[in-house]
Amino acid sequence: MENRPYIIDLPGHSSESGNLSFWDNLELFPSGIQRCFWISKVKKGETRGNHAHQLESQVIISLVGILRVEVTTLVGEMLWFTLDSSSKGLFVPPLNWISISFSEDSILLGLCDRAFSEEDYIRDKKDFDNYQKRNK
């Protein structure tokens, strides 16, 4: 499995009556979605995320507004993504540090391949930097 984040297209249909997007990707999440979460009402200038996961993969989707996602990979590469459509998602494999900025009134939807586990989080950037040093 590739360890770099990348944009995926979500299947769906558009018509005069609206847009329908859905998730049925068993290639990325063979066991299906194990957890989902959403984040809204983030104040201007604040960021969310600011962590990495040891084992969990996620797909981040902007349901409303624009999300700007900054990613630091395990090998120290900096990547930037803009999510501005509910028909696209950002696949984030484990061991990628993410920081997300929100436009006004944005809503983020997160889909995860694992149940919540506090032990899976890397919340201290120095700890993540140590993971990077071991993998260079």
Image: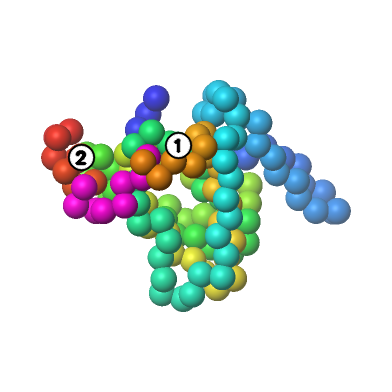
Q: Which mark is residue 57?
A: 1
What residue is shown at x 57% (from left), y 35% (from top)? Answer: 34
Residue 130 appears in the picture as rendered: yes
- Secondary structure of the residue carrying tag 2 is helix
What residue is shown at x 36% (from left), y 45% (from top)? Answer: 121
Q: Is residue 113 above or below residue 97?
A: above
Q: Residues within 10 Å of mark 2 (few under 14, many from 20)?
A: some
Instruction: Tell whether 108 sits left or right of 123.
Output: right
Give the percent coordinates (x, y) of residue 74. Answer: 25, 40
Q: CA distance from mark 2 to mark 1?
A: 17 Å
What residue is shown at x 49% (from left), y 60% (from top)? Answer: 67
The quadrant of the rendering that contains the C terminus is: top left
Q: Which mark is residue 131?
A: 2
What residue is shown at x 55% (from left), y 23% (from top)? Answer: 30
Which residues, given as a range, are shown in magenta?
Answer: 120-127
- Quadrant assignment, res 24: top right
